[in-house]
Image (tube, grey):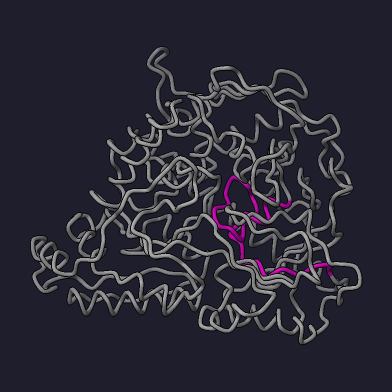
Amino acid sequence: MVSVTANRKQANGIRQWAVLACVTLAALMMASCSQHKERADLIIMNGAEPESLDPAIVTGQPDGRVAGALFEGLTRFNPKNAKPIPGLAERWDIAEDGQTYTFYLRTNAVWSTGEPITAEDVVYSWRRALDPLTASDYAGQLYYVKNGENFNTGKTNAATGKRYTKEDVGVNAVDTHTVKVDLEGPTPFFLDLCAFRTLAVVPRQAIEKHKDRWLMVHPVPTSGPFTLEFWRIHDRIRVRKNPRYWDAQNIQSELIDLLPAESSTTALNLYETGEADVIWDKNLIPSELMDVLKGREYVHTYDYLGTYFIRFNVTKPPFNDVRVRKALTLVLDKERIVKNITKSGEKPASCLTPPGMEGYTSPEGLGRDQELARKLLAEAGYPGGKGFPTFNYLFNTSEMHKQIAVELQAMWKKELGINMELRQVEWKVYLSDQSKMQYDTSRSSWIGDYVDPNTFLDMFMSNNGNNRTGWKSPKYDDLIRQANQERDATKRAKLLHDAEVLLVREDPPIAPLFFYVGVNIFDPAVVEGVHQNLLDEHPLWPLRRKAGAPKPGTKPTEAR
């Protein structure tokens, strides 16, 4: 285990270098493209400036949307319903026990630079995402593959006495176009996972040649429908149609710009002046204007799998005491937050897993009970809040996040007599500090990666890189592992339910606040191909400006 820790430290160093390389890439591309004047077909407000475009590294939605346009997996998401459909694999066979998948790659699938995409590329990509040196927070998405977790966590094979290696991972090339995958157990959502960013196919030869600088090489070989034209930091990322993509005839736009913004006011102003065609990041919708915006025909709301919650850093006192975490949760007035701040129809949440997943009913978490909260805080040694240390609340730049933070600060002061300091930082700093556990409490959210409760619950297993609370529960881990092996849907749902009871009621490292409502802004008379779905997945390839619609930069008419 000591060596694993060392590897983790080394990996984190490499990850930081990879992120710095991306920033450098952006700066270099900014210089080389400063004279670029061509207007894009579509301009999209994408959210915060991405941390990286490497599919194995990205964790946030803004990063993932771009990475997903550049790199594809064996399957891809249907833009209408977010269900998996054939991607680089044109078909597959599933063994009767549900534990072995055989994928057949398209023979016309090639990199944007012309070389064929092979089964070895798939094997390399998945093993790379699992390699501890890659330091992927999303490596857990590949723990369902045989020995994926053993390799990623540096375990020793009891039979051989040796550490598991990448060659032990259950993904292998049968021939040039055939990939065989052995799983740890039946995984009903495995085809969904194959469409997710972490499992996308990345350019083996470019990465082996250029190491962590591979995204700095121009052109970057891509496997998806678009190529990276340039990335101007704090300006835009431009992607261009990949003419060698296997489904190039169905890519609807030649050039798309994705603009970063952390101010909802800026985003709306750019839309209203015609400088942007789409706003699809939920954080860029000005909640204070939702009462007015909801009546506009360009505002689209819909159900989707997203939960807003608070993380507690359970490795630090006083949050290592479950009584404290429960006390802070029990005084939250969630109705007040969704009524006065978010205003889009969000529902207060006491559990992590949102409704909408067939065959699963989430447990009730902690309700609102101020008296019990004060009793628990006193039992923890802080009667009336006396002696409770001033703590910080980490959140990224966003007006809505700030308003919620101020509200939480007031609730905890009024009900428990404790003091919280606000710590607002930019997106990259937020992600980094949360990953490094450099916070006391932190705002968080999670959007389902697939339509199954596991996408919310496996995040809090002890070894999952997205846990980010320091919370470790062997009982919880065991319940999730049992669920992953269970083929009976009813028994599996019961195991997941029991695990969620631990997470939100018995030993909570988080405090759920509300379930999101999806909000997109675009004019259907101008843009088509944007579909509302439970995963908030919006692939770029079906998007296009309608014939005869105003050009980018044209101020919209009153009808918009």
Q: Please state the horizontal and vertical placement of residue 194, each as a whole percent of the image.
A: 63, 37
Q: Position of residue 175 (x, y in %)?
A: 75, 19
Depth order, front residue of 285/43: 285
What residue do we see at 28% from left, 45% from top? 502
Give the residue at the far bottom of this rendering: 558
The quarter of the picture where the N terminus appears is top left
Front-most of residues 260 and 324: 324
- In the image, is residue 66 part of the stretch drawn in magenta? yes
Question: Outermost residue, top direction?
Answer: 159
Q: How many marks?
A: 0
Q: In this rendering, would 338 be left or right of 187?
A: left
What is the x, y in percent for residue 95? 60, 18
Image check: 237 left or right of 359? right
Segment colored magenta: 40-69
Q: Is residue 438 visible?
A: no
Q: Is residue 543 magenta?
A: no
Residue 394 in the image: above or below residue 304: below
The quadrant where residue 333 appears? bottom left
User: Relative to residue 311, is residue 168 depicted above or below?
Assistant: above
